Image (spheres, rainbow, N blue to C red):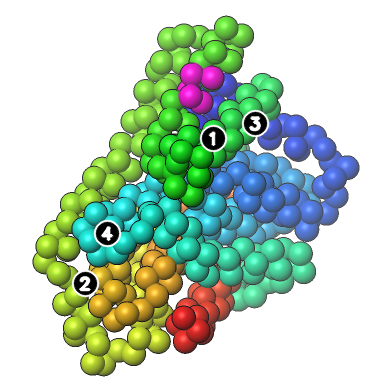
Amino acid sequence: MALIEKSGGIGGFVEYVVEQKSHVNSARSSLMLSYIIGVVIFIESSITALISGAVGKPLCDRYQVPHAKLAYVCDSTSAPISSLIILNGWGALLLGLVTTQISLGMIQGNGVDILIDAVMYNFYAISALIVTFLSVYFSIDIGAMRDAKYTPSSESRVNLESKSMYYMILPIFLMIALVFVFLYLTGDGDILKGSGSSSIFYTMLTTLLFMFVYYVPTKTISFGMWIKTAISGAKKLFPIAMILLLAFAIGKVTGELKTGLYLASLASESLSIYLLAGVVFLLSSLIAFSTGTSWGTFSIMIPVAVPMAVAMDANVALCIGAVISGGVFGDHCSPISDTTIISSMAADCEVIEHVRTQLPYALISGFVALILFTVFSFIG
């Protein structure tokens, strides 16, 4: 993503979309364009918020749409869509956490299959995307959003050099396609049995090689700048690698201490199996809101929720889905979340205003998710 930004591909894409004024002729269509971009670009939550905000801000300025509404759209299509379409770092982390539980003997089966089942129960992300779409399409303003006013944009804090949009589109398209190719190859012809982590690793290497051949000979980026930018982008992922490393450590320690089994023994007398998924969702939400990180929440809660579900003979995939949903919900509401801050920055909106105006919509989506976890606990 650092190389794509440096190539001018993101700026070119923004310029191309903004110039298609015949397709965007109202406040609703300007917000809907940002919503669509947020759904289509699911590679990384921060990039999703950045691009949808960068595209939507000049259009929202033209039709005097409150920046708080744009920030809400950016935020609501970043983490939710990234946690649903897991061909990205989110998928790699979650697959690693699920695989750890398999290696510890807590659960059995194929990690990819279990993760896909769990994502199907990511009720908060699904609910948030639907609520956001309805609020944009029908211009529904509730709570603090009713009082949000349009203010002219300050000077953009996202300065992107503009070149061909294909410098962005082609690498991203290749990235998406190669994940399926390598899943097929590592699974010996069965995509569902492929190695997710290996497929993402091979995909990134191949895409980087393609970008070198695409950018350097065409003088889009010099050889030295390509190396410097690639290293800079890799450095930004170091915290993610550390989270994954420490997540494995947490999983091993909690497994050895039988933390999940202990909590299950305490809860078994007072907590009904039909309420387990809902309680996991609420606890994950609280942790994510307090820490501002959904990834950290996944790392803490999956090693706890899986043994509890096994001990209580509950639906393991449903409980993992509750962890994912709770992590996204709490992160969505938290004023210290990176996606909250980036969405505010991209939309040129104050962080506190964004949190206040977004909270009623997030609470509605969270309530719907809680009801669905309870219902599916009875069904399953």
Residue at image point 55% right, 73% down: 365
Q: Tell me which segment is drawn in magenta.
A: 206-210
Q: CA distance from mark 1 to mark 3?
A: 18 Å
Percent x, y of residue 5: 54, 28
- Say which element carries label 4: helix
Three-letter residue code for mark 4? Gln
Mark toward the start of the polypeptide (2 vs 4): 4
Q: Give the label, 2 or 4, closer to the camera.
A: 4
Residue underneath mark 1: 181
Residue 91 visible in the picture: yes
Asked if the magenta segment contains residue 207, the reply would be yes
Which element carries disc 1, helix, strand or loop? helix
Q: Are marks 3 and 4 in contact (CB under 8 Å)?
A: no
The amino acid on which the numbered mark 3 sits, given as a three-letter code, is Ile
Q: Which residue is mark 2?
A: 260
Instruction: Identify which amino acid the numbered label 1 is placed on.
Output: Val
Give the residue pinned by disc 4: 101
Q: Which residue is mark 3?
A: 169
Instruction: Identify the residue at horizontal 46%, vertical 81% (top origin).
Output: 380
